[in-house]
Amino acid sequence: MLLEHQTFQRDQTDRIRLHVLPSDRFKTYAISAYIGTTLTEENVTPTALTPFVLRRGTEKLPETRAFREKLDDLYGAGFGFDIYKRGDYQIAQFRMDIIEDSYVSGASGLLREGLQFLGDALTGPLLENGVFSTKYVDAEKRTLQKKIESIINDKIRYAAERCLEEMCRNEPYRFHPLGRLQAIEGLTPESLYAHYLKWLGESPIDLYVVGNTTMQEVKALVQEAFHLTGSGLAAYRSEAVHRTSVEPRTVVEQLEVSQGKLNMGLRTGTTYADPDYAALLVYNGILGGYPHSKLFTNVREKASLAYYAASRLDGHKGILTIQSGIEIANYEKAVAIIHEQLEAMRAGQISDLEYSQTLAMIRNQLKEMNDSAFELISFDFNSILTGHERTVPELIAQVEQSDSAAIQAVAGKVQLDTIYFLTSRKGE
């Protein structure tokens, strides 16, 4: 059952927007801090490296072992981070979950300790001679390098990234959120620390807390735990998608692969903030979002042309991508049958079963968010990024109101932009 009264309370400190959901439904406090910055060639790599260095130690807990032992002392609290992109923004998300006091005999002040730990990790890092630790920077440069190389070695992920890179070759979105391999070596403790100060001083910062607490309590604890320079709140800019109709580009790349990777990038003309976003969600679900979808059923099952075939939507950028793995000899056939599915969507050729199953899948996914504090946080952050506030019940209602006419209208705006094919080297 959806709890429709679940709305985040909003407030702010000098540099941080606060979002608190008082709730006794969870046994832990869920804490998320989001720091976002525009994707640029100059900043994407140092921004990606910074969280890796911050997680190694603080001024109070300079050794990584002590840093981790402190989490154990906090009854096994969890701490981690993710780096990803939403539209043309690179987002660093720091997460912490810590048990609520009432579930531990004799415990008190665990939310204060959790926020203090997070505040120290973000704003009180270990410094040596006024900059980051050389040992930690060098070690984490190798970590970041291995993570980027792992993408290159995973040809499914590599093809997906290369398709976006080619499609958005003149846009910030072309950059991978983990940065550029060739830029890692040149980063130093001095340059990284200078970047960190600028990043922390100028970026939008949003702090979420879900649990048995109040905005008043959280605000006081955050002011105590976070030591930020600068003043004023930075904000995200939500820009409209502009698209001129052009012939799709085809990019063929040759590597040592035994299976072809056929990826397509499409512009939808719709983003999370738009009224027809819910219809676009349904469109993606019917096209390739689920095992009952047209791509899976027609390209993989009926025609046996693909090992996998699916579509994925980035609602913040308004881009839809199609991924498939095929026998190299089946390229022309696979392209043709994928085109057929896109045309079927434009023509409104959607069966009652495709429609009802898709609505059920989306509805269930959205309802399941209520079982996870971090999912609720992630969903709400969409509103902050786009400036368009939308609750889970509202989105479910909008999805259910998306009839065949609305889906067909969305389909009419979708335009194929780029075809990317990863194939074997000649002669292999």
Image (cartoon, helix red, strand yellow):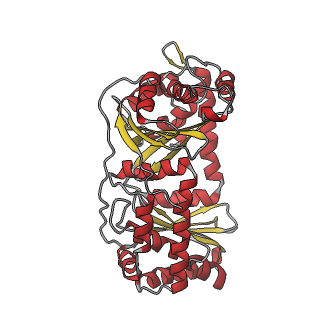
User: Which quadrant of the structure image shows residue 281?
Assistant: bottom left
Q: Residue at x 35, y 54 (%)?
A: 389
Is the N terminus in the top left, top right, bottom left or bottom right quadrant? bottom right
Look at the image and tell me whether residue 396 can be seen: yes
User: Which quadrant of the structure image shows residue 319?
Assistant: bottom left
Residue 76 place in picture, x, y as percent: 68, 33
Residue 317 place in picture, x, y as percent: 40, 58
Residue 179 place in picture, x, y as percent: 50, 43
Above or below, 358 relative to 89: below
Q: Residue at x 56, y 29 (%)?
A: 114
Residue 406 place in picture, x, y as percent: 37, 77
Q: Residue at x 48, y 56 (%)?
A: 3
Closer-to-camera residue (33/331): 33
Closer-to-camera residue (324/6): 6
Look at the image and tell me whether residue 303 can be seen: no
Is the C terminus in the top left, top right, bottom left or bottom right quadrant? bottom right
